[in-house]
Amino acid sequence: MEPLVQFIGRLHPMLVHAPIGILIGLVSLEILYKFHKQTLDHSVRFILILLATASSIASIATGLIFRDDEGYSSLTADLHQWFGIGLGVVLIISCIAAGKRKLVGYAITLCLSAGLITAAGHFGASLTHGADFLTEPFASKKTTSAPTPTPTSPTTSNSPETATHASTDTNSTPPATISQFELTVAPILENHCISCHGPTKVKGNLRLDSPEAMLAGGEHGPAILTAAPLDSPILTRLLLPLDDEDHMPPDSRQQPTDAEIQAIRAWLAAGGSFTAPPPAQNPQATPAAAPTSSSATPASSTPTPTPKPAAIAPRPKRPEPASHPEASAIAALRAALIHIAPIAQNSTLYEVDVAAIAPTMDDAAIDKLLIPILTNISDLNLARTKIGQPTIALTARMPHLRKLDLSGTPIDDAAIAAIANHKSLESLTITRTSISDPAPLLTLPALTNLYCWNTKLSEDSLSTLRARPGLTLNSGSRPAPAALETEPPPVLARVGDAAAPGPSAAQSLKPINTMCPVSGKPIDASKLVVYQGRVVGLCCEHCAEAFLADPAKYADKLPKP
Amino acid sequence: MSDLRPHTTNLPHPVEEHYLDLTRRRFFSLSTQTLAAGLGTLALGSLLGAKAAAATDPSSQATPTQPPLPLLGPNFAPRAKRVIYLHMEGAPSQLDLFDYKPQLRGRYGEDLPESIRKGQRLTTMTSGQSKFPVAPSLFRFSRYANNQDGAWVSELLPYTAAMSHEICYIRSMHTEAINHEPGITFVQTGNQQPGRPSFGSWVSYGLGSMNANLPTFVVLITQGLGNMQALSARFWGSGFLPSEHQGCRLRSGDDPVLFLRDPEGITRADRRRMLDLVGELNHQEMNESLDPEIRTRIAQYEMAYRMQMSVPELTDFSDEDEETLNLYGPEVKKPGSFAANCLLARRLSERGVRFVQLYMRGWDQHNNLPAEMRAQCKAVDQPQAALLADLRRRGMLDDTLVIWGGEFGRTVYSQGVLTPTNYGRDHHPRCFSMWVAGGGFKPGITIGATDDYSYNIIDNPVDVHDLHATLLHCLGIEHTRMIFRHQGRDFRLTDVFGKVRPELII
């Protein structure tokens, strides 16, 4: 469309207000004069009706252009158009009637035109603002409690969560029936495209609100190319620079975030199917893939977005003693420099840590302090103290004891036997003790973590303990794991004919030579360069530098291709 | 969570507060002096202690060595009780350590595409470069088993890589700052502007001490082997929090604390009498001026007195067995080395020190990166892996957060001339890698991803405030509720930002 024509079309939204205003004025004057039993001056009447007629005809003309330009195609648009044209026709008749002073005809047509302009105005407003524009404030009050499945707001670039909003919003993995398209792409189209390429507007004769319409395409062909999904205009137009006139969405509109573009790319890379399920949640991209294209921008690896739990998993509530310990008991512990504090605000469970004075604490010293608070103890750190059997025996009277550290204490098998059958103990540390008997440890029903590095427990005992279901045992003997795989030695550089097809870095790189062309020594498999598309091995970094500085000089020392 | 109380509730008007404080202090001052006169022999220190305790917990009585009480303790039952923060000062290159980019292998020397850089700001150190040649890492990466399908780590960190099953790698950290001072200030205090309390100070303030004989927040520094940047003491300052929450730096030399021993002719009893006298004078002044810094001064004198006894035992490694010393590597016996500081950090944590802040300097590889990184990584790799393994086998990793990372990342393009064996990298705030182990972080996972150039984040960005919020969550602190009012405004570590990230934690 010619820009000038387009410009004239766009005057429509402004022009339409002229007949409205003029007609309101005219009708008001007529009623007012009628009320006062007077007659409106003919020339005033005629000039006003003439102006109303002229401006409505201008509105109709511009409106037809505007509709074509913007691609409105809905029943509302049709109604708006025909009511508008009807208005124009009626006003012309009214104008003639007024000119010929046929007042009855003039009055009828004027009333009719008032009705028509109301209808045309209503549908016009519905087109621009939506059918429920006026009633929306009342309706939204009722529905705010219901969660909306669409993204709440466009995200900024540092939180590309919209790509997976459906899964985060619903707080569960999507049911198998939801396709990747529906899950990740449809909401983006809904947000950014449908307003101009959907049921109300069909710009460029393209609709993006159904798979069929996307494949059918518009003036410029299909939006999705099934043969080469990644070349589909729906993606390529997104990737054009913002100032390119083919860029979509237009630069005046809100742009999709990088994450949203990535979601569309990922969907197309997976084939662009409308029905395929989302890929399995696999956060590790396969790093072995090498870039295949040689353009300046390699196809970005598209990692599957990390699965995001919607909320922090609540932790099971623990039973708690009914009351806090006596204040004097707490004060006595603190006076002895023993740390005691509730494990959390509003909790009657306490943690007790004797670290500050551990080496001086023996059974007699600690027991008299602990006895008044036994029922409140949850976590007890007695590491590096001199305690023995009497203190361990006290644990039987600690019904809420969850974590006990006895590391580096003189406890032995006889002493630890007193812990047998403790009902609530979950974590026990007996590192650097002389314990050798696993029997009492096997009687602890709640035990999930046992730290027994540097004890006298035999390999057999450790295996017995390991076999206990639900128990994680750490004996400190874990051998350092070796790498599962190692990437091939990286090529230091590529020189020579850049167009020569080089080996991909991720493939096995086998040098063509065994001796360094610079020094004549055997090559080092990690000092490789690619020259004229062939892998050349060198013996050291210095030779690599020398070779790269002037490869032609050493070319004849290499095996012939 | 509605039953959680914030750390400060309904603060009175500052003027009211002042008069309240005045009355309260006069009262305690009077009553304790009467008491002292009555008992005659009771040392002043105990009165000070009693008063300090009374100020926070009226129900408790105390003695001279009474520890400062936690202000309120955790909001909810925490996973972690302690923190060891290994700060890599200077910002290590994510491209050469954790952010594996095989796609770059074939792109040596190509210009960084504008579609990646998008005109973003650079430092003035490279903004004048005419070309931005892509420098793929010179180092080979290997995949190590974790609780997902493996973590790719560079050959520079073989020991750390072997601990991947304990580590939560975050490859999508990003920050606002582009230079070291604001960068470190941001990761340490939650704000680029100096003057806010350090992370460790907040934790000290919120959770208090677990060992009355040692500071709650300890700082250890290792000198780097590469290009070093200034390390200001304010990084571990307490800002507007009471000064007893500032980090206590232990020296890197043979004597971690100078002048620990009393001079000849002075006995421990003499020292006590001297402190009591000074304390009395300080106390008079405090009652006159109500300056909280005097209270801090009294507390610090008492702490120093107690550290005379606790520090020699702490820093004496002779009770460590040979196998443990070997675990930390050959440098463990060299005071101030990263290995010695890692072992010291473990010993501090074992003794209930809430927050140990280690600094490894020298990660600012603007040029000569391969050689400097080799040296830096060699210095940290074995000790930090040993720290994890040692904490694990002692049953401490479950409730100790070990944090590793710098203040930002480094660029994919070379600063200065790129050769096949040498390159440099400039500052890059848009993405960098950190890791956290233990303390309720998910073990053996990798979070987040960057684009093929490790330039922009394409999946799951984690900003510094989010990390702070999540770390505080592990410590049982609701980050929106740990508040300190200063100059009429409520402050938090996360200020008005931060989200706890459930995907990072168990």
Image: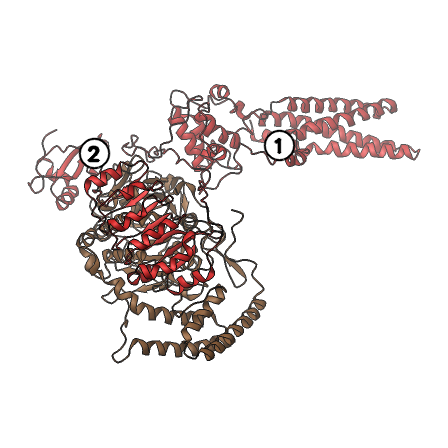
Chain colours: A red, B brown
- Asked if residue B133 can be seen in this view, the reply is no
- Asked if residue B395 can be seen in this view, the reply is yes
Q: Quadrant of residue A159?
A: top left
Tell me the quadrant of the picture where the C terminus of chain A can be found.
top left
Residue drawn 43% across the image and 26% down it:
A180
Residue drawn 87% across the image and 35% down it:
A32
The amino acid sitting under disc 2 is Asp
Q: Quadrant of residue A545?
A: top left
Per the model, the C-alpha gap separating discs 2 and 1 is 56 Å
Nearest the camera: A364 or B187? A364
Badge 2: chain ID? A
The amino acid sitting under disc 1 is Arg
Residue A126 spot, x, y in % from top left: 66, 29
Nearest the camera: B279 or A278? B279
Mark 1 Cα shell of 10 Å, populated few (<14), some (14-19), many (≥20): some
Nearest the camera: A206 or A369? A369
Tell me the number on the disc at residue A10.
Answer: 1
Residue B367 vs B504, above or below: the answer is below
Q: Which residue is mark 2?
A: A497
Left or right, residue A123 beside residue B342:
right
Residue drawn 25% across the image and 79% down it:
B264
Residue B80 spot, x, y in % from top left: 38, 50
